[in-house]
Image (tube, rainbow, N blue to C red):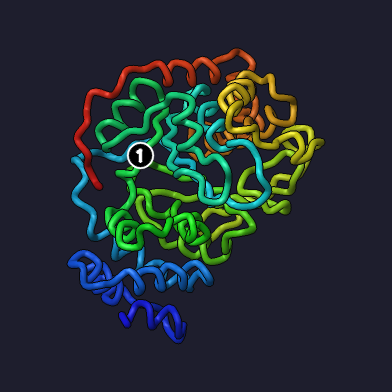
Amino acid sequence: MHDALTGLLEQRAPVGRETWRSWWDQLGDGSLDKAEALALLAALTSRLPDHETLRHLLDSLAERRPAAPATTSWEGTVNVVGTGGGPRTFNISTASAFVAAAAGVKVVKTGSRAYTSSLGSVDLLERLGVRLTSSHTQTEDTLAAHGIAFAGPFVYPAQLTRLARTVAPYSMKTFGRFLNALGPFLADLPVAAQVTGVSAAAPLDTLRRLAETATGRRIWLTSNDTGADELLPFATNTIHAGHALTRIIRPGELTPGDGSFADLRPADPDTAVAHFLSVLSGEAGRVATRTVCLGAAALIVASGSRRDWLSAVSVAEEAVRTGAAHDLARRLAAAPAPRTLAVSGA
């Protein structure tokens, strides 16, 4: 049994970086069998380990990434990604990304197919006709052209793909709890900021410790008293930034505080695109519009383009009211395939 698996099972001390290096080495050369890979994923999923073990795991993956193209940090660009889980809603963070971009903020959205929901962000984008980018250069080009980009699997460590192949035909969906929790810390993009919603299904305290040790970008973690991984106008929301408690947003503070999850229920997959476009145009109800605009305001403030939350909510509402958010989604769906196809960082 590999020391990484032994350490996770015994939980006597953090699993160190050297141990994780050995694990990835053996995974790469084929000396780890399917049973051991499955056991490790099961151990990570049944009980997420301490933040030190996770930091060592993340660092061991980061050091294996191929060098990204020489590029400066994408100043003013914000990544939005959640942990999933919690009450079921439509794809709020994806809609908020379009609204924030339509309000003038450069936004990258990372995500995945559904692990714990019926329709993940990638599933929705596929139905909408929006292509994922396949390299850093392609993402940068798409940002320049549209102000928003949806990054594909290239941002995630190649070792995870190898792990998925090793455990096949078992689905990685089985381990969605672990993958959803750690996923927001795995994407490799030179953004200035990241906003991550944390549901009650994810260990907030552990993720806060991870965020405090992250480098290269500032990370906001948002949570609320409903257990959802989104900012909600009818909930008490908390925004954590590094070591500081940034602020608490209470119902009625920035938007009217009425509403419930009944106003945010997910659409049937067959009507998801029509419903999503109605959200962006403000035709899905006042609560849906307020929720999406509150999420967009977080991206606007996190990006540094505005400091005042009320004005950030206002410009987000204007992007919906004028049809700018809806039109942006339509333009991106109709855009030709990006010109650069080389994969980097995969």
Query: For this view, does 113 lie left or right of residue 297?
Result: left
Three-letter code, disc 1: Gly
Give how far across and how far down residue 112 sits, in percent.
45, 44
Res. 74 image quadrant: top left
10 to the left or right of 61: right
Kindly identify the residue that appears in the image at 35 percent across and 39 percent down.
152
Residue drawn at x 45%, y 81% is 9
Label 1 sits on a secondary structure element that is loop
Residue 117: x and y, percent? 58, 46
**33 relative position to 90: left or right:** left
Residue bearing the label numbered 1: 152
Is 206 or 343 nearer to us in this picture? 343
The answer to whether residue 246 of the structure is visible from this angle is no
Number of other residues with Cα within 10 Å of mark 1, as a class: few under 14, some 14 to 19, many 20 or more: many
Q: How many marks?
A: 1
Q: Position of residue 190 (x, y in %)?
A: 33, 43
Q: Horizontal and vertical percent for residue 61?
A: 29, 61
Residue 273: name its quadrant.
top right
